[in-house]
DNA sequence: TTTTTATCGATAAAAAAATATCGATTTCTC
DNA sequence: GAGAAATCGATATTTTTTTATCGATAAAAA
């Protein structure tokens, strides 16, 4: 019987840890030696070395007995999995305080993301530049998505207008959405949506804290 | 043989979904009927009804055949699990653009969190009020954590100072940390830390997008 | 040169999470 | 009032993820 080799795509929990390994590796890149072992990474991050090694398997990088992995290779390979060695253009909609914070977040440059324009409906913002990124009226979105072939949309509008903005972007060919609006939005199944609501991680924090306090 | 009933604490994936159910329920709370079924929630969110029902089990709420769950009861019970029916005071450190966005985020009031003071080292910010929350110099932290019995710290400082700020808060009795600094920080094992780095969810987004584009 | 030691990586086992099955229940429809 | 339809919730199965085991390897130490 022929057994088809199942293509193992990188699991989400692994992807999350990989981004964290990357920041640890990034720190060590300057100061330390050329190699890092799964044991070291695990110790720094309070994880299991076996888990780290399993995660790193997905990079395709081979380690060296007694030494570990070449830091530079690992750094490159993790960025490759995340597609952070390439840069994708993105539009940000909703230039309120969160939107402005994201527009000003330098770090995304090294995370494969370049926000090339912002959108809002507030007349005071339109035409302004925030962190050197120009803000346009939302009605410019349809034309510009197509003309500039932008694939990523960042949703920072209030809950009440999130679905409308999402629909507008999807209708005009956006492929992926990063949703900061504190609401569930509906998208067709072929559109990638990643929810980044802060309340999700806050919920975990407050739950754990309550458990901890209860334990006394 | 006696079999100890294992205490099943709520799994993290379930907690994350519960916060999302909450926002869906919140929307329906005004407009619709008194009941909602797992099927309805699942349809709205693109999940499996069985999974929704399993998650809702952790609330302890019983549903009614053919009707579903009482919306009000569900709403309350989910908030109870997350401990969002109580309010915890918090300090925010680092009043840069992300910090300011969080200080201004009204919604946290309904998520059991009240930020009662901000801290920074920038002389221009100290003494100011941002969204009606006063900013103090970081050197006031030790005294104030103890005096006000604050349990949650929100870290919005740059990577380079994150570990120092975390140490300062831990040394002075903070119990839980919500870390927005794009770096791994070390804490004692009894301290709750929840990482909210945006890059984690961005990594998932860019990875998926790359896979999708590759598939053509 | 030989022995010791730390690490990798293949394979296996265990645990956790997601999905499926199905009888019991209760409203809704006729 | 009888039958149909939809949902819950207990139990079981499958899948995914985490953790464990152990031989092979190569640097470091003796």
Image (spheres, coloured by chain):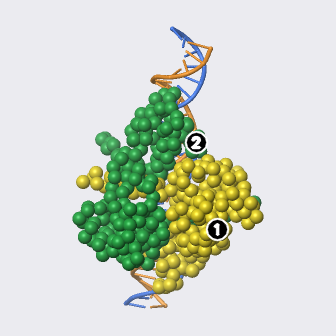
Chain colours: A green, B yellow, C blue, D orange
Where does residue D12 sit, x and y in percent of width and height?
A: 50, 57
Q: Which residue is mark 1?
A: B127
Taking the view exactly as shown, the residue that stands out farthest to the front is: B124
Please state which of residues B41 and B4 is positioned toward the viewer in this rendering.
B41
> Which residue is at 41% across, 37% downward?
A73
Measured from the top left, where is residue B1 in percent x and y?
Answer: 70, 51
| Host chain of mark 1 | B
Disc 2: which residue: A44
Residue A109 shows in this picture = yes
Residue drawn where x is 45% and y is 66% of the image: A100
* Within-10-Å neighbours for mark 1: few <14, some 14–19, many 20+: some
**Count of numbered labels shown in the rendering:** 2
Residue B205 point in image, percent of width and height: 39, 57
In the picture, which quadrant includes the C terminus of chain A? bottom right
**B113 to A84, vertically: above or below:** below
Please report the residue visible at 28 percent of the width from the left and 51 percent of the height from the top. Answer: B214
Name which quarter of the figure residue B7 lies in. bottom right
* Above or below for C4 versus A147: above
Say whether residue A12 is left or right of residue D29: left
**Nearer to me, A124 or D21:** A124
Q: Position of residue B110 (x, y in %)?
A: 58, 74
Q: Answer left or right for B4 relative to D13.
A: right
Q: Which mark is residue A163?
A: none
| Chain of the residue that carries numbered disc 2 in the rendered image | A
The residue located at (42%, 70%) in the rendering is A95
Mark 2 element type: helix
Marks 2 and 1, how far apart in space? 37 Å
Q: Is residue B118 visible?
A: no
Q: Nearer the viewer, mark 2 or mark 1?
A: 1
Residue B86, quarter of the rendered image: bottom right
Pick the quarter of the image with the N terminus of chain A. Answer: top left
């Amino acid at each position: 019987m022929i057994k088809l080799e199942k293509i193992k795509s990188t699991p989400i929990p692994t992807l999350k840890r990989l981004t964290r390994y990357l920041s640890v590796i990034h720190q060590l890149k300057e100061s330390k030696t050329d190699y890092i072992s799964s044991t070291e990474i695990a110790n720094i991050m309070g994880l299991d070395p076996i888990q780290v090694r399993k995660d790193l398997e997905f990079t395709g990088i081979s380690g060296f007995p007694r030494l570990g992995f070449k830091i530079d290779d690992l750094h490159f390979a993790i960025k490759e999995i995340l597609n952070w060695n390439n840069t994708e253009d993105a539009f940000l909609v909703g230039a309120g305080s969160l939107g402005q914070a994201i527009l000003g977040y330098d770090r995304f440059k090294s995370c494969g993301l370049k926000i090339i324009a912002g959108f809002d409906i507030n007349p005071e913002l339109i035409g302004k530049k925030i962190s050197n990124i120009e803000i346009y009226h939302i009605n410019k979105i349809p034309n510009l998505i197509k003309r500039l072939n932008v694939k990523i949309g960042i949703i920072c509008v209030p809950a009440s207008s999130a679905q409308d903005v999402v629909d507008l972007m999807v209708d005009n060919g956006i492929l992926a959405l990063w949703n900061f609006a504190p609401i569930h939005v509906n998208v067709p199944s072929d559109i990638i949506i990643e929810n980044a609501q802060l309340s999700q991680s806050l919920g975990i924090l407050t739950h754990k804290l309550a458990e901890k306090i209860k334990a006394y």
